[in-house]
Amino acid sequence: MFKSSHARRFKSAHNSAVYHCISRTINGEKLFGDAEKEMLRKHLLQVAEFSGVQLITYAMMSNHFHVLVRIPEQGTISDAELVRRYKALYPSPTPHRQVHIDVMAEILKANGEDAKKLRESLLRRMNDVSEFMATFKHRFAIWFNRSHKRFGHLWSERFTSTIVEGGGHFALQMVAAYIDLNPVRAGLAKDPKDYRFCGYAEALAGNKALIRGLQIAVNSEGQVLNTDEKILSTYRLRLFGKGVNAKRGDPKAARISAEDYAKTAATDGELSPAERLHHRVSWFTRGLVIGSSAFVSEHLERYRKSTRRRQHLAPRPFEEKDTSSSSWNGLFSLRRHG
């Protein structure tokens, strides 16, 4: 690992680089409750989609956040993909923003000098850790100041970053576990799965992008895992192993009890169908809807009529390959994508 506030200046020996990024609030003030952490999470997923970076995991805390991301080399990006990525920043665009998106598409289609400048402007903001973090922090700061009727700086620093060796090195797994164990270290949860605002909990809830992110971490020791269930169970086992082996006597150490580790090891990190169901229900249904497809659709239609929002909402089935538990059959939830 190499730590630096300007770590992106050091090029990886591979075709892509992985960064552990941290940013704190001004004076370390504890400004973020659940609503703010949820908005941080949403902005993170939106900006990652726009920037073309791959999230491995994250943790949103009361006065700082951790993000572990893979920045791939920038390949050829079509105009349609540029527009799609830009739209990811505005999943529910205002009429004015929609006009702006439509104009962008027309400029690119015309393929003149303005299209060239627009492409260059958008591409400069993609596949770059500094641009990714700047966009993420700036967008959230605007939302935070407006919603809390405040002004001035929110963040105490640009951000700090560490280049993490991937390509089969255990360092990547170690850093991922360190991030997901933050809520345990802070005394906010005994099990990272029970802390909504970390990457492991969201991956366990079914976010495919974050499952693919954790796949990078668990495969970092050379063991190639391809199924979602195996990725999650292997990561959980290694996560608990890092926690139970935390340095004793260190008040900052993330402690997993020996008893909890033994239970996890006995099942090879797999959760029972009942535990998975409980986790997904608790993760997806805070302020949303759960029930049959017809029930969720009925409430979705009411929501659309009252808000006039028609994008990025849909009844989603609880996907589970283990059909031995009848509790999953016919169960849907209503949630925003990202």
Image (tube, rainbow, N blue to C red):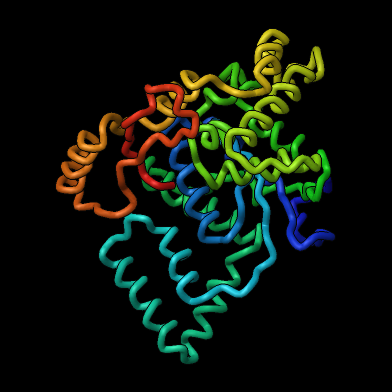
Please indicate whether residue 108 sits to the left or right of residue 95 in the image. Answer: right
Q: What residue is drawn where x is 47% and y is 49%? A: 43
Position of residue 133 relative to residue 174, above or below, is below
User: Is 312 in front, or is 113?
Assistant: 312
**In the rendering, at what x and y percent does residue 110 appear?**
41, 88
Front residue of 150/70: it is 70
Instruction: Check the image and name the residue furthest to the front.
Output: 324
Residue drawn at (40%, 26%), measured in percent from left and top? 281
Q: Is residue 159 above or below residue 104?
A: above
Q: Is residue 207 left or right of residue 285?
A: right
User: Which quarter of the figure is the N terminus placed in?
Assistant: top right
Q: Position of residue 23 (x, y in %)?
A: 63, 43
Residue under the point 35% across and 72% down? 100
Q: Which quarter of the figure has residue 214?
A: top right
Asked if residue 171 can be seen in this view, the reply is no
The reply, left or right, for residue 10 in relation to residue 53 is: right
Residues 97 and 214: in front is: 214
Q: Which residue is farthest top?
A: 259
Q: Nearer the viewer, residue 290 or 60?
A: 290
Residue 227 visible, this angle: yes
Residue drawn where x is 63% and y is 21% of the image: 184
**Residue 204 drawn at (x, y percent):** 53, 32
Q: How many marks?
A: 0
Q: Measuring from the top left, give residue 279's x and y in whole percent.
A: 47, 24
